[in-house]
């Protein structure tokens, strides 16, 4: 299996790149989306290899995934102020992807391949170097989208069980596993607000991928934030919890958008004839890092968010 193809269920032809014209600044589209004023944009990598899943370890250090070999995805660490990317697990031969970091930087959670058809989740204590693991179930199965609670005590993730992909949580020892959201359709990309009260996630419960919120305590009070015929995916709360960054193909190809945490004020952040994807907030809440595909080449870019 080529691990660059281990993409989420939204990586479909429905999100294929299509060229469309540049729009006037601050133009209000028929769908109510505002095209943001162009912002400062800086390219962070230049190796052009397939990349995904950037996440900040701290204000100057990124962890992200690169295709090291056709059959392997590898976790790398990058200093924004200089130096070359370095492997997190230098001697690891299995694919590792979808990293998540606790707010204090102590714990790292990520997915690790077990076979071509299954993926487990590893939770690593970066201080003690001890690891805990939730292995995949038998057959074709795996975890998805690990994310930490703001206090760093629990890890959220998604897992297919009983015909549905649900949101679960566990402690940092991979114990005390609980179902948090069990609804129709497929759930993915959990993100918890900084105050620990609100769960943000994507779901197909209403037909296509839309973005929802619920109680981060028990999954109750599900509320839909986006209403669009396109696919709205990969939502993440900003560090202050006031905004959400997400990916959508609502304007023709996959681009990055932001909105208020209640779903209002949708603004388009990127405009690229190919694909912009996998956004993550800088800890300052003013910038994002994302993966941009240009002429078939993939690199990380740092961009101001208006």
Image (cartoon, rainbow, N blue to C red):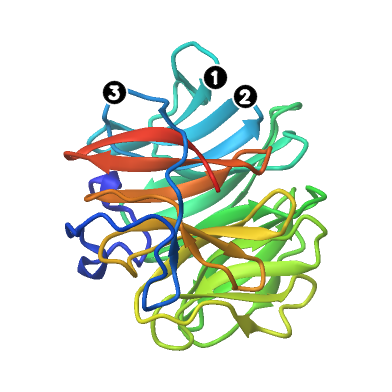
Q: Distance between the residues labelled 3 and 2?
A: 20 Å
Q: Which residue is drawn at 30% across and 62% down?
A: 11
Q: Which residue lies furthest to the top in this view?
A: 83
Left or right? Give the position of 127 relative to 78. Answer: right
- Quick check: can you spot residue 245? yes
First in residue order: circle 3 vs circle 2: 3
Q: Distance between the residues labelled 2 and 1?
A: 6 Å
Q: Residue at x 58, y 77 (%)?
A: 225
For label 3, the crowd category at 10 Å Cα-Cα, with few meaning under 14, some 14 to 19 and many 20 or more, is few
x and y percent of residue 172 in the render?
74, 48
Q: Residue 79, which numbered label?
A: 1
Q: How far apart are marks 3 and 1 (CA)?
A: 15 Å
- Quick check: can you spot residue 52? no
Are the two marked residues, 3 and 1, in contact with CB atoms closer than 8 angstroms?
no
Which residue is denoted by mark 2 in the rendering? 60
Q: Residue 47, which numbered label?
A: 3
Left or right? Give the position of 130 relative to 75. Answer: right
Is 109 drawn above or below residue 238 in the view shown?
above
x and y percent of residue 192 in the render?
70, 60
Q: Which of 230 and 137 is in front in this view?
A: 230
For label 1, the crowd category at 10 Å Cα-Cα, with few meaning under 14, some 14 to 19 and many 20 or more, is some
Q: Residue at x 27, y 31 (%)?
A: 49
Q: The residue tagged with tag 1: helix, strand or loop?
A: strand
x and y percent of residue 84 in the render?
44, 13
Are the two marked residues, 3 and 2, in contact with CB atoms closer than 8 angstroms?
no
Is 300 drawn above or below residue 237 in the view shown?
above
Is 167 drawn above or below residue 78 in the view shown?
below
Q: Which of 38 and 279 is in front in this view?
A: 38
Q: Residue 191, which numbered label?
A: none
x and y percent of residue 230 in the render?
34, 75
Q: Which of 90 and 15 is in front in this view?
A: 15
Q: In which quarter of the image is residue 297?
A: top left
């Amino acid at each position: 299996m080529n691990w660059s193809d281990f993409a989420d269920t939204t990586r479909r032809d429905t999100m294929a790149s299509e060229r469309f014209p540049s729009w006037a600044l601050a133009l209000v589209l028929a769908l109510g989306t505002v095209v943001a004023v162009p912002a400062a944009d800086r390219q962070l990598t230049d190796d052009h290899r397939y990349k995904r899943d950037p996440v900040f370890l701290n204000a100057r250090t990124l962890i992200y995934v690169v295709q090291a070999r056709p059959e392997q995805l590898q976790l790398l660490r990058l200093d924004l102020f200089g130096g070359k990317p370095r492997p997190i697990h230098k001697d690891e031969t299995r694919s590792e992807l979808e990293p998540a970091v606790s707010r204090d930087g102590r714990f790292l959670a990520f997915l690790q391949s077990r076979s071509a058809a299954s993926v487990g989740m590893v939770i690593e204590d970066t201080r003690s170097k001890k690891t805990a693991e939730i292995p995949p179930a038998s057959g074709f199965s795996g975890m998805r989208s690990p994310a930490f609670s703001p206090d760093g005590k629990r890890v959220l993730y998604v897992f297919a069980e009983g015909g549905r992909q649900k949101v679960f949580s566990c402690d940092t020892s991979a114990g005390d596993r609980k179902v948090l959201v069990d609804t129709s359709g497929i759930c993915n990309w959990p993100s918890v607000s900084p105050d620990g009260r609100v769960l943000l996630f994507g779901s197909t419960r209403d037909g296509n991928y839309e973005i929802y919120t619920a109680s981060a305590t028990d999954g109750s009070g599900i509320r839909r934030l986006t209403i669009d015929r396109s696919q709205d995916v990969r939502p993440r709360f900003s560090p202050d919890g006031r905004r959400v960054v997400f990916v959508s193909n609502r304007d023709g190809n996959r681009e990055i958008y932001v909105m208020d945490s209640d779903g209002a004020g949708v603004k388009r952040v990127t405009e690229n004839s190919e694909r912009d994807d996998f956004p993550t907030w800088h800890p300052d809440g003013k910038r994002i890092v994302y993966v941009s595909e240009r002429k078939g080449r993939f690199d990380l870019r740092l961009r101001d968010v208006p």
